[in-house]
Image: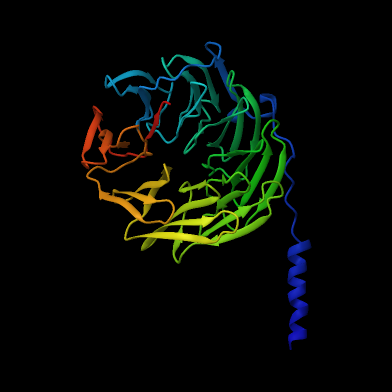
């Protein structure tokens, strides 16, 4: 009976292997000119003044407000120094983060604009746009990756395409572009060893950072939605469900994989590496968990559960893991053993990252404005108050200039 079953089984496999029309291979090289791009995916740029290195205004913090405007706030005088707004943003939301390199602030706006400004004065060096006003490209959940004279960012187009762009940091012009597999690509690229790593649909790509040439492509069974990170040796990325993968940086071979707890998923940006260890937070239906694992072997070192709540954000500062939950619980965890060093239910709900001044305080943003939280007194001081509050608040971003 078993022998008879083997024939149709093999026939079914053969039909699937040889009967389907193979997908057309992607080009090995990226586009390096607007001439090869449709109008909806072109890059336009305008130089206002020559880019130069700028000293840091270390008395200020950059606030990317949830209305989509970015401003510099002087922490000593408690006044706004300068403000940058997108030219024609119909979606009033932040949705992105900024990067400072050599005193230049690189700001992506949700409407496809990218602006490089002086961190001290807010004066514009150059303005760039991916896409155009008619066929607008969306930049969402992006942190500009700036290295070796280029800025790397992924964008989603209303025409159903998604692209990774490399721009020249001197003037914002197109260096190279590559069309990805899916429109829903809002993951920040990883720059490592002169390569760019970015997931798209169920694939992970590696590119030559200078030319955009495809160096590797790894296919997975599930959609890859995690932010790729590195420990300085290997690459780590999670799928949309419950598995974290460790990959070799050159061949993208799977070295090990870590399966999350039952009914847990969505690591996304809640992941970082330090000292050959990897830390990642997973959401869950009943319990969310913060994990620590050896980055060489994938062996779990410790875990910390949060019952009845989901971890929204995690970061590291001075051998401690800081974060907050969906229900507004702020926590500090010892990075070495997973023990809770500090935990409090906030009266204000954070919607941003956490920044750490030199004193015994932290900053975060809520719907009312900038909160300065005193770790000794547990006071939530509204350090900067917004003049109005929106009904739909997506996210905000803070960056102390230093």
Residue in view at x 53 percent, y 47 percent? 275
Eyeballing the image, is 207 above or below 261?
above
Judged left or right of residue 268, residue 199 is: right
Q: Residue at x 63, y 50 (%)?
A: 203
Numbered marks: total = 0
Image-quadrant location for residue 132: top right
Tell me residue 384's x, y (percent).
Answer: 26, 28
Please give the name of the residue rendered at 63% of the width and 48% of the height, measured from the top-left corner: 234
Q: Is residue 51 above or below residue 278?
A: above
In the orientation shown, which residue stands out farthest toward the bottom?
Answer: 1
Residue 119 seen in this snapshot: yes
Q: Taking 328 as reference, is 302 left or right?
A: right
Q: Position of residue 39 (x, y in %)?
A: 61, 27
Residue 304 position in % (x across, y down): 39, 59
Which corner quadrant holds the N terminus? Answer: bottom right
Looking at the image, residue 82 lies above or below residue 64: above
User: At x 31% / y 33%, what residue is drawn?
Assistant: 359
Is residue 224 visible to the viewer in this orientation of the structure? no
Q: The C terminus is located in which quarter?
A: top left
Which x, y percent locates residue 249?
67, 47
Q: Nearer the viewer, residue 381 or 70?
A: 381
């Amino acid at each position: 009976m078993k022998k008879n079953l083997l024939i149709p089984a093999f026939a079914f496999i053969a039909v699937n292997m040889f009967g389907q029309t193979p997908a057309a291979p992607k080009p090995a090289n990226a586009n390096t000119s607007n001439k090869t791009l449709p109008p909806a995916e072109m890059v336009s740029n305008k130089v206002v003044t020559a880019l130069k290195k700028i000293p840091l205004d270390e008395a200020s913090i950059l606030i990317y407000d949830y209305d989509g405007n970015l401003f510099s706030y002087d922490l000593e005088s408690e006044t706004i120094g300068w403000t940058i707004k997108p030219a024609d943003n119909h979606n009033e939301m932040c949705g992105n983060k900024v990067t400072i390199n050599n005193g230049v602030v690189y700001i992506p706006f949700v409407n496809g604009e990218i602006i490089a400004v002086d961190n001290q004065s807010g004066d514009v060096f150059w303005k760039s746009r991916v896409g155009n006003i008619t066929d607008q490209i969306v930049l969402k959940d992006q942190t500009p990756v700036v290295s070796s004279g280029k800025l790397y960012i992924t964008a989603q187009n209303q025409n159903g395409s998604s692209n990774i762009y490399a721009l020249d940091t001197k003037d914002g012009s197109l260096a190279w572009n590559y069309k990805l597999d899916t429109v829903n690509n809002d993951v920040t690229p990883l720059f490592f060893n002169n390569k760019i790593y970015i997931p798209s649909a169920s694939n992970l790509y590696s590119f030559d950072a200078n030319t955009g040439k495809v160096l590797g492509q790894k296919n997975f069974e599930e959609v890859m939605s995690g932010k790729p990170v590195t420990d300085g040796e290997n690459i780590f990325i999670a799928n949309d469900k419950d598995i974290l993968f460790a990959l070799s940086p050159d061949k993208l071979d799977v070295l090990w994989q870590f399966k999350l707890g039952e009914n847990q998923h969505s690591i996304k940006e809640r992941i970082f590496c330090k000292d050959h260890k990897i830390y990642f937070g997973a959401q869950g239906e009943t319990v969310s968990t913060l994990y620590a694992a050896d980055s060489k072997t994938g062996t779990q070192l410790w875990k910390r559960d949060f019952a009845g709540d989901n971890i929204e954000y995690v970061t590291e500062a001075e051998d401690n893991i800081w974060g907050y939950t969906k229900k507004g619980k702020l926590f500090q965890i010892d990075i070495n053993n997973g023990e809770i060093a500090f935990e409090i239910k906030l009266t204000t709900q954070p919607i941003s990252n956490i920044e750490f001044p030199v004193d015994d305080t932290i900053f975060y943003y809520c719907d009312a404005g900038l909160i300065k939280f005193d770790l000794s007194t547990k006071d939530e001081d509204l350090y900067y108050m917004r003049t109005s509050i929106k009904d739909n608040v997506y996210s905000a971003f803070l960056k102390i200039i230093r």
